[in-house]
Image (cartoon, helix red, strand yellow):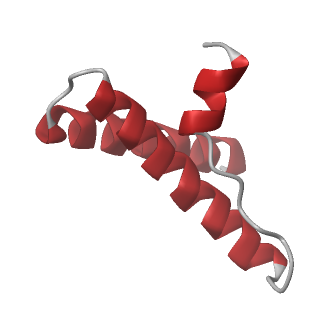
């Protein structure tokens, strides 16, 4: 992906006026929405997009939990 393409699909979260938790939650939300937009543009169906993203988020949570134990 070149710079022009990344500008189409990567949304920056504004930092002004937001606390750290809100910034982190906003970045996650924007990242997921950007990923969904790119996946949809590449021809993927909503159900497949949803399954992939939910599986990836589940893996992140499980990996974090296993490190904490």
Left or right of 68 in this view: 43: left
Foreground pick, 53 / 1: 1
Depicted 18 relative to depicted 9: above or below: below
Q: Residue at x 58, y 23 (%)?
A: 5
User: Observer-nearest residue: 57 or 13?
Assistant: 13
**Is residue 47 rendered to the left or right of residue 67?**
left
Residue at (44%, 51%) from the top-left corner? Answer: 33
Farthest residue to the front: give it: 4
**Image coordinates for residue 27, horizontal then vertical, percent:** 66, 58
Give the mark count: 0
In the image, residue 4 sits, relative to residue 13, either above or below, namely above
In the picture, the quarter occupied by the N terminus is top right
Which residue appears farthest toward the right when viewing the image?
16
Image coordinates of residue 12 in percent, x first then y, are 71, 53
Q: Residue at x 38, y 40 (%)?
A: 37
Which residue is at 56% across, 36% downward? 8
Viewer-nearest residue: 14 or 28: 14
Residue 32 in the image, given as x and y percentages of width and height: 47, 48
User: Relative to 5, is 14 on the left or the right?
Assistant: right
């Amino acid at each position: 992906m070149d710079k022009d393409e990344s500008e189409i699909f990567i949304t920056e979260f504004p930092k002004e006026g937001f606390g750290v938790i809100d910034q982190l939650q906003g970045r996650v939300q924007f990242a997921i929405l950007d990923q969904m937009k790119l996946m949809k543009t590449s021809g993927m169906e909503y159900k497949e997009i949803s399954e992939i993203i939910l599986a990836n988020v589940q893996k992140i949570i499980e990996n974090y939990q296993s490190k904490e134990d």
